[in-house]
Image (spheres, rainbow, N blue to C red):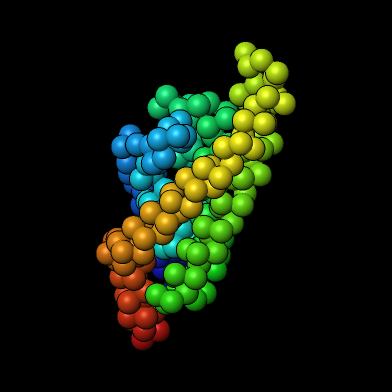
Amino acid sequence: MTENLNQNKQRISTDKIAKMGLMSALACVMGFVRFPIIPAVGFLTYDFADIPIIITAFAYGPMPGILVTAVVSAIQAFLLGGDGMYGFLMHLLASGVFVLVSASYYKNRKTKKHAVISLVLASVAMIGVMAVANIYITPFYMAAGVEGGIAAVKKMVFDLMPLIVLFNLIKAVLNSVITFLIYKKISGFLHRESIRRKVERPVEEKSMNK
């Protein structure tokens, strides 16, 4: 019986890893569709890559969500023409904070009401973290070739901060609404194997005990 249970766990784990890989690939593909939201800060563009990441985190928990976030951030930044280390850090921070907060809250409170609360909390956390990150990380990476260096870039960031906050607010709302609308449709696919194994397991255990 122990051997049988171990085989079941291994199948579930393998299935989960495969589906995490699939969601990572989907996120990278969806990342190609990007567009500016606010013309005055056209360098800030929105894409749909975070949707599969958030759905994965809701389905499997915060740590798998963070892992998928890191993989997608690295692929986009270093292999798909992103902004290198700067792009990787900013994406990892933005998506990672959103995933960690939302999935941590949602994992033990899986109702529509708490899904909304988790997304609101994650949005607030992401907006706050990215405001700080833009103040301290962006000047470090963008100062090269700018007259006045880091101080000049930091001043520019402060001047643009209301628009940066607005951009992240719109981004968070879009990600939240889309995730809320489609999560249940996709979560069935993500949980299908594990649900089937849970149903079969008592039958198998009963058969082993005869």
Q: Nearer the viewer, residue 124 or 88?
A: 124
Residue at the spot 67% in from the left edge and 31% down from the top edge: 155
The x, y position of residue 42, in whole percent, is 43, 32
Q: In which quarter of the image is residue 30?
A: top left
- Describe residue 8's horizontal placement relative to residue 181 as left or right: right
Instruction: Please name the residue shown 44% across and 70% down the image.
Output: 115
Instruction: Classify 57 as above or below 75.
Output: below
Task: Kindly identify the residue that appears in the image at 32 percent across and 77 percent down.
Answer: 199
> From the viewer's perspective, is 206 left or right of 70?
left
Q: Where is residue 91 in the image (x, y as percent from the top left)?
A: 52, 40
- Residue 139 x/y as whole percent: 66, 28
- On the image, which quarter does residue 190 sit in? bottom left
Image quadrant where one finds the C terminus: bottom left
State the residue at coordinates (45%, 40%).
Answer: 72
Give x and y (percent) for residue 192: 30, 65
- Say if residue 94 shows up in the picture: no
In front here: 50 or 192?
A: 50
Which corner quadrant of the image does residue 13 belong to?
bottom left
Q: Which residue is more in the foreground, 202 or 128?
A: 128
State whether residue 73 appears in this view.
yes
Q: In this view, does 37 lie to the left or right of 83?
A: left
